[in-house]
Image: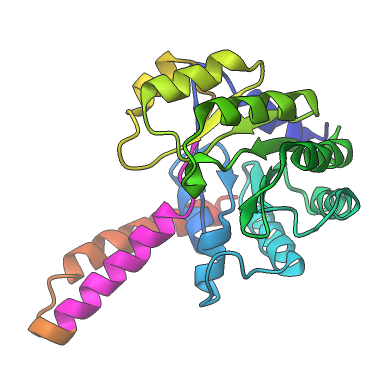
Amino acid sequence: MENSAEAFAALHVPGSPLLMPNPYDIGSARVLASLGFRALGTTSSGHAATLGRPDGSVVPGEALDHASKLVAAVDVPVSADLEDGFAEGPAGIRAIVGRAASTGLAGCSIEDWVGGAICPLPEAVERVTAAANAARGRLVLTARADNFFRGNPDLDDTIARLQAFQEAGADVLYAPGLTTLDEVRAVVSSVDRPVSVLARAGLPPVAELASVGVARISVGGAFGQVAYAAMARAARELRDEGTYGYTSLAAEGQDVLTAFSAATIDR
């Protein structure tokens, strides 16, 4: 693997999970890097929101351009959310992962939610195999099983999919939407690759996830949603109350921006 991919792979230690937050633009990427996070992941929903569009509306060129800008903005490994690979078949998957590898990314992810439905397992395996072949030696490939995230909490099928993705060549396995420690433990104990989980309401704390062997924790679009929520709260206060209580949070934000600006100058 290239150096960035090797460094990224080495950060995946079962029992000592990599906390990998998901910035939505250059500024948020630099803030998170300045706070000491050792790797970052793009977020499809967060990126789409910066364009004023819903998740799933970003096209391949936009996603890769966004990812390359984040890579250039920080000195830590970046992994790209490539959604379903923006392609209907394995050839298209190979092409998009190959393009991703040329951006300086350290990793990428491919999911099995395709065209508004969970992809049949044989087809999903073909897609992961194509991605793995294109990523090998160049990117850390995360294969994502979307059952729980899409309202189908079938643990047995999720495990079967992750095991198949492992055999197809994925480097990291990811099942967003798991909530209980028992679910996470079952997944981790059923595969031989690092397991990533999505931080969400109800998920056990980091220390408990570490205790069952989780290797990575990401946040998806949550940090972007927090930022938009804070702005909306401030705007409603101004509109409805005519007061400026939000300025205390703004002062905190200015301190954050000042710190990351200094860190950027020192790069």
Q: Where on the picture, by quarter, is residue 131? A: top right
Residue drawn at the location 41% of the way across and 54% of the way down: 223
Q: Is residue 15 above or below residue 224?
A: above
Residue drawn at the location 61% of the way across and 26% of the way down: 11
Q: From the viewer's perspective, tell me whether residue 101 is left or right of residue 234.
A: right
Q: Identify the colour scheme used.
A: rainbow
Residue 68, image x and y in percent? Answer: 72, 58
Q: What stretch is highlighted in magenta?
A: 217-238
Residue 255, image x and y in percent? Answer: 31, 58
- Quarter of the image for the N terminus: give it: top right
Q: From the viewer's perspective, tell me whether residue 32 is left or right of residue 169.
A: left
What count of labels does the image hold? 0
Q: Is residue 80 above or below residue 164?
A: below
Q: Where on the picture, by quarter, is residue 38? A: top right
Residue 145, image x and y in percent? Answer: 61, 38
Does the segment drawn in magenta span residue 233? yes
Q: Main secondary structure of the magenta part?
A: helix
Whether residue 21 is visible to the viewer of this picture, yes or no, is: no
Does the segment drawn in magenta span residue 129? no
Q: From the viewer's perspective, tell me whether residue 130 is left or right of residue 46.
A: right
Residue at the extreme right: 91
Q: Where on the picture, by quarter, is residue 64? A: bottom right
Q: In this view, does 99 lie above or below 9?
A: below
Q: Is residue 251 above or below residue 102?
A: below
Whether residue 176 is visible to the viewer of this picture, yes or no, is: yes
Residue 159, image x and y in percent? Answer: 59, 25
Residue drawn at the location 30% of the way across and 36% of the way down: 202
